[in-house]
Amino acid sequence: MFDNAAGHVGGPCIGIEYTLADIPEMGYTKESSPYPKGEVCIRGPSIFTGYFKNKTLTDEVLDENGWLHTGDVGMLGQGNCLKIIDRIKNIFKL
């Protein structure tokens, strides 16, 4: 069944895994109630393998298990639909 409701980005694409990583300093954990929250991490064959000739930046976003840490904070809602609710680092200073 196709979910065309507004307010979320849906589930993962075919061939992509996703998980949420705890961010205790921001109060986001996989045990959050009523829905799990945390940093959106993805991996799969179509995810980039690193920055060109820049191991330092690559090590900042890719962990030892191949998860790409996006910097987005997500919440898994009904039907495991992912909703982006925050950023770990803000790009703009207000």
Image (cartoon, rainbow, N blue to C red):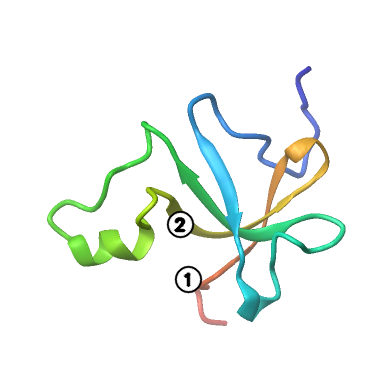
Residue name at image x 66 percent, y 40 percent: 9
Q: Residues within 10 Å of mark 2 (few under 14, many from 20)?
A: some
Residue at mark 1: 91
Q: Where is residue 33 in the image (x, y as percent from the top left)?
A: 85, 62
Q: Which mark is residue 45?
A: none
Nearest the eye: 27 or 90:
27
Nearest the eye: 94 or 63:
63
Q: Of the residues shown, which amino acid type is indicated by label 1?
A: Ile
How far apart are labels 2 and 1 at the CA level?
Answer: 16 Å
Residue at mark 2: 69
Residue name at image x 69 percent, y 68 percent: 28
Q: Locate residue 63 relative to residue 37 in the image: left or right.
A: left
Residue most toward the top? Answer: 1
Picture layout, residue 36 above or below residue 29:
above
- Nearer the observer: mark 2 or 1; the answer is 2
Q: Where is residue 89 in the image (x, y as percent from the top left)?
A: 51, 72
Q: Are marks 2 and 1 in contact (CB under 8 Å)?
A: no
Q: Position of residue 65 (x, y in %)?
A: 39, 51
Residue name at image x 48 percent, y 27 percent: 15
Q: Residues within 10 Å of mark 1 (few under 14, many from 20)?
A: few
Q: Of the residues shown, which amino acid type is indicated by label 2?
A: His
